[in-house]
Image (tube, grey):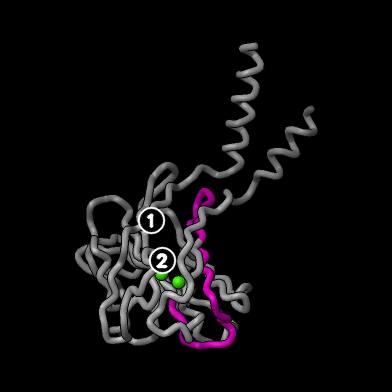
């Protein structure tokens, strides 16, 4: 029995199973931009990091200009209806944080930045600066997936807190809209020159590290047995 418990805890260590948010495919004004067509987004966390996975319909190794951003409202009541990259997006609400990434060097790398809003957008960290509070992963570019991670502490949240978010894809121009929004399964914009508009934001609640869940579960098991 002891051996079995150890096995359960070991199997549960690491990341919680991801929360998956689906988007329609083919919902762009120009569906030839498959690398900008979000099919789903996965979020998960451990004790320190929020892990962001954006799955697209394209091949990120085949293009060199994809940008992937997340507007986040940490629930504090602050923020602004804008973003730190000057993208032409109406969130329909305020966001407190903006994190965005790129896969624009033919798939051999990934970069990103994270910002918070405090009477203006302040850069908290960037891969190009060698900062330790953001990191990217290009290992799944060929299958259309962009992955990066940011610190929960930079978002001002911890276990049990809920963040509200939308994920967008965009191009390299400062005034480009969100070409695809996770929050909409219809067109978020009709052209590069037209502002995109979010639908309802999704919610994600920061979960305890899986090891802690397993231990709590075992505690409950023991308690149940004792009652019997
Ligand atoms: Ca899509
Ligand atoms: Ca969409």
* Span of residues in magenta: 42-67
Q: Looking at mark 2, is its residue's CB closer than 8 Å to ligand 2? A: yes
Image coordinates for residue 191, horizontal then vertical, percent: 31, 85
Image coordinates for residue 34, horizontal then vertical, percent: 50, 81
**Residue annotated with mark 1:** 202
Q: Is residue 88 visible?
A: yes
Q: Are marks 2 and 1 in contact (CB under 8 Å)?
A: yes
Secondary element type, mark 1: strand
User: Is residue 180 a member of the stretch shown in magenta?
Assistant: no
- Give the residue displayed 29% in from the left and 60% down from the top: 96
Q: What's the CA distance linking mark 2 and mark 1?
A: 9 Å
**Residue annotated with mark 2:** 182
Q: Quadrant of ligand 1?
A: bottom left
Secondary element type, mark 2: loop
Residue 147, placed above or below residue 85? above
Specify the farthest residue to the left: 119
Query: Sequence-wise, which precedes: disc 2 or disc 1?
Result: 2
The crowd level at tag 1 (other Cα within 10 Å; few <14, some 14-19, many 20+) is some
Q: Nearer the viewer, residue 177 or 116?
A: 177
User: Is residue 43 a member of the stretch shown in magenta?
Assistant: yes
Residue 134, placed above or below residue 213? below
Image coordinates for residue 200, horizontal then vertical, percent: 32, 58
Q: Is residue 73 left or right of residue 141?
A: left
Q: Nearer the viewer, residue 25 or 58?
A: 25
């Amino acid at each position: 029995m002891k051996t079995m418990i150890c096995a359960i805890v070991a199997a549960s260590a690491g990341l919680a199973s991801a929360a998956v948010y689906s988007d329609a495919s083919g919902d762009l004004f120009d569906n030839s931009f498959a690398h900008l067509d979000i099919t789903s987004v996965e979020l998960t966390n451990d004790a320190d990091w929020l892990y962001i996975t954006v799955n697209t319909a394209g091949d990120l190794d085949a293009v060199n200009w994809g940008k992937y951003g997340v507007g986040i409202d940490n629930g504090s009541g602050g923020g602004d209806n804008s973003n730190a990259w000057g993208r032409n997006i109406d969130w329909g609400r305020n966001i407190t944080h903006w994190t965005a990434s790129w896969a624009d060097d033919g798939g051999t790398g990934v970069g990103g930045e994270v910002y918070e809003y405090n009477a203006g957008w302040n850069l908290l960290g960037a891969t190009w600066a060698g900062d330790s509070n953001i990191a990217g992963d290009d290992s799944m570019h060929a299958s259309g997936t962009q992955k990066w991670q940011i610190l929960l502490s930079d978002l001002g949240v911890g276990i049990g807190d809920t963040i509200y978010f939308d994920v967008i894809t965009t191009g390299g121009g400062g005034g480009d809209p969100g070409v695809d929004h996770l929050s909409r399964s219809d067109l978020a914009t009709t052209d590069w020159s037209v502002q995109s508009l979010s639908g309802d934001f999704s919610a994600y609640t920061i979960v305890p590290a899986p090891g802690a869940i397993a231990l709590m579960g075992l505690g409950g098991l023991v308690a149940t047995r004792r009652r019997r």
